Image: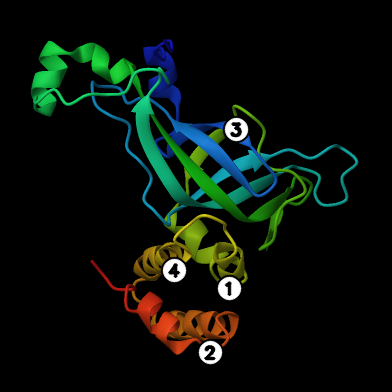
Amino acid sequence: MRLPLTQTSINDRPQNHIAEVIETATSEFLAQCLEPEDLSFPMMPAFGSFVRSLGVTPETSPVTDGGYWVYAVVYHATTTPIDSIHRARALGLSLEQLRSEQPQIFAMLKTEFRAAIVGFETVESRNSRSRIYQHLPPRPPQIHQAVYQCHPDEVIRFSEEFDFIRILLEIPGTPVDALIAATLRNIYQLRHTEQSWLVQAGRNLSLLLKDDYDRLRYILSQVYIN
């Protein structure tokens, strides 16, 4: 059974520090959500939302001298028992009843999500300048690196270019049309319904879909404001 986080570590972490890398690969990573302060389930990041984690480069790397932020889009999330042998079963209790009668339940479940890497941002320590690239970084985040929910300003800056859409189209075993729609919808809302941005995104998507207008219409029909 996992050990609970100490109160000090919970209070000290930034609000947007939501998870930790537990499995890593060239094009994606698996992260486990951190436990909340109270007896409740960890909050899953939204489907199609942006997260970031720190990538580390050797001192001799020509890419950057200060590491880089790896940007990724959440495409799959699960809540399962930490014990892979026994499945969770229905108890017929409300959340408040679970807290009072079965508080151990919260320590027996884990929430994880997979995120597809869509780019990275270099951090040059000598002049504090940065540059965003929309392709795979030299290395993915390492195990146990913190994962942060991206700030709206970070998402807006990253989405000035549209090459990330091509990466999302190529994720295997994923409902990519729904994922692209959710990602564009999230960005569109963060950009305060910037119509010119949405038109550019639609044009880029049309080229990638080779003028498959039915598919394009289906995806863009899901881009709206809540």
Residue at image mark 2: 211
Residue that appears at 59% across and 27% down:
144
Which mark, by number, is residue 208? none
Residue at image mark 4: 177
- At mark 4, the secondary structure is helix
Q: Circles 3 and 2: CB distance less than 8 Å?
A: no
Residue that appears at 71% across and 52% down:
122
Residue that appears at 40% across and 18% down:
85
Q: Position of residue 112 (x, y in %)?
A: 43, 35
Mark 1 and mark 4: span between their CA atoms?
Answer: 16 Å
Q: Nearer the viewer, residue 216 or 189?
A: 216
Amino acid type, label 3: Glu
Q: Is 142 on the left or on the right of 95, as rendered?
A: right
Compared with 182, 1 (above or below) is above
Depth-wise, is mark 3 or mark 1 nearer the camera? 3
Mark 3 and mark 4: span between their CA atoms?
Answer: 26 Å
State which tag comes first along the sequence, 3 or 2: 3
Depth-wise, is mark 2 or mark 1 nearer the camera? 2
Amino acid type, label 1: Phe
Residue at image mark 3: 23
- At mark 2, the secondary structure is loop
Q: Nearer the viewer, residue 47 or 172?
A: 172
Crowdedness of circle 1 by 10 Å Cα count: few (<14), some, many (20+)? Answer: some
Residue at image mark 1: 162
Compared with 105, 75 (above or below) is below
Crowdedness of circle 4 by 10 Å Cα count: few (<14), some, many (20+)? Answer: some
- At mark 1, the secondary structure is loop
- At mark 3, the secondary structure is strand
Compared with 102, 223 (above or below) is below
